[in-house]
Image (cartoon, rainbow, N blue to C red):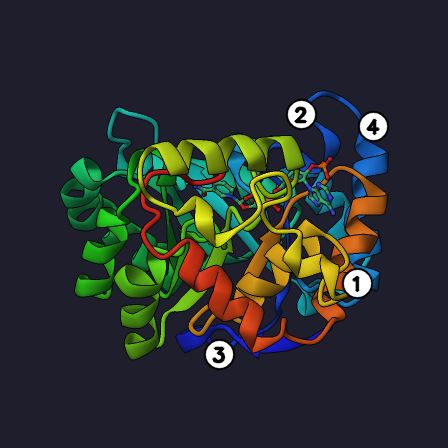
Amino acid sequence: MQTCILGKTGLRASVMGIGAGGPSRLGQRDHIRSESESTELVLRALDAGVNFIDTAEGYRTETIVGAAVAQRDRSQIIISTKKSLGRENISREALREGLHQSLRRLGVDTVDIYHLHGLRLEQYDYYSREIVPELQDLSRQGHIRFIGVTEHWNDDLAHKMLQRALADDLFDVIMVGFNLLNQGARETVLRAAMKKNIGVLIMFALRRALSQPDALRTTMQTLIKRGEIDARDFDLDDPLGFLMADGSAVSLQDAAYRFCRDEAGAHVILSGTGNPRHLDANLASFARPPLPPRHVERLRHIFRHVASVTGQ
Ligand SMILES: NC(=O)c1ccc[n+]([C@@H]2O[C@H](COP(=O)([O-])OP(=O)(O)OC[C@H]3O[C@@H](n4cnc5c(N)ncnc54)[C@H](OP(=O)(O)O)[C@@H]3O)[C@@H](O)[C@H]2O)c1
């Protein structure tokens, strides 16, 4: 497994990270898997060289992650978890209590990265003034190694909250929505993050539009109607078939993960699944070489004006 240095944290992370949330929640969303099967899935990823796991109190997968971590060397694993925020501002006490509950569920004394989960622009002033100092205090006390923030991409398509966070330089790590369909974060977020050496986690690499061919076709039709892509640039019956036609990629998902992995400024690409076959396929994707530059250029060209979809 290829590794990278996660910006200013100095942590050496695998470029593929396990996402314990998203549409699958390790198979827990529709109870497709038992908890022990989901634990096995995490262990399978760890044994294949993944050392980064992202969870959150809101995903209800922290105990599963904790059960897997307890069976391996904790010191070799980077655990990222998050405090749910909701619409009402949370208090300093609620933050502290939330962290301690997460530590208990994970069965660890320290989390490597603790994020504010899905912070919205209108909440930014309160959280930066009242809650970030508390996070810094918890970090000094040794409960958190690094501080992070994740965006609410579906409601913040232009990444406005992260742009403020980057300008203020309050966070060690950020999580941003980016995929081959909507590459807007390249200019608005990744460039600034690189300048400040912020650790960058990528979410939404696949989501629905890049994991299900029918959803991709529907998304492409929507984007044509909105004038964000040009139907002359691809074959609507098989919009991204050119990536597979010459053997450059083995599947749409394969291409989508590799596209994100090789984006400048992206460190860890989160991959969420509840399916061991998908996990194995995704591990294989992260081991493949970069997509040919002509395909990367074509993907940049086709989607260069897209700003209205996340692939959700
Ligand atoms: N604001 C936030 O903080 C936030 C928001 C969203 C996500 N996240 C984090 O980011 C992680 C990644 O989330 P994501 O939803 O963006 O993940 P993703 O990896 O882009 O997409 C996951 C979806 O793709 C499917 N999938 C995965 N591998 C596949 C394959 N090889 N073939 C076909 N389908 C495949 C999964 O279904 P199967 O289960 O069937 O494989 C699931 O429905 C989350 O787990 C979470 O940790 C954070």
User: Contact (CB < 8 A) between labels 4 and 1?
Assistant: no
Name above or below for residue 94 compared with residue 80.
above
The three-letter amino acid code for the residue at tag 2 is Arg
Residue found 20% across the figure and 37% down from its top: 123
Horizontal arrangement in the rendering, residue 44 relative to residue 114 (left or right):
right
Residue at coordinates 60% horizontally, 51% vertically from top-left?
240
Residue 171 visible within the image: no
Label 3, on which residue? 10
Distance from the alpha carbon under mark 4 to that under mark 3 = 35 Å
**How dense is the environment of label 1, judged by Cα within 10 Å: few (below 14), some, or many (20 and up)?**
few
* Disc marking residue 34: 4
- Crowding at dot 2, Cα within 10 Å, few <14 / some 14-19 / many 20+, comes out as some
Q: x and y percent of residue 248 in the render? A: 71, 67
User: Separation of disc 3 and disc 1 at Cα?
Assistant: 26 Å
Whichever of callouts 1 and 2 sits on the residue coming sooner in the sequence is 2
Which type of secondary structure does the marked residue at label 1 adopt? helix
Residue closer to the observer: 116 or 15: 15
Q: Kindly check if marks 2 and 3 are in contact, taking CB atoms under 8 A apart as contact.
A: no
Q: Which one is earlier in the sequence, the residue at label 2 or at label 4?
A: 2
What label sits on residue 93 in the rendered view? Answer: none
> Of 224 and 74, which appears nearest the observer?
224
Q: Residue at x 40, y 56 (%)?
A: 183
Q: Which residue type carries mark 3? A: Gly
Picture layout, residue 19 above or below residue 23: below
The nearer-to-camera label among 2 and 3 is 2
Query: Which residue position is annotated with label 1?
Result: 284
Kindly report the distance in space between the C-alpha atoms of the residues bearing marks 2 and 3.
33 Å
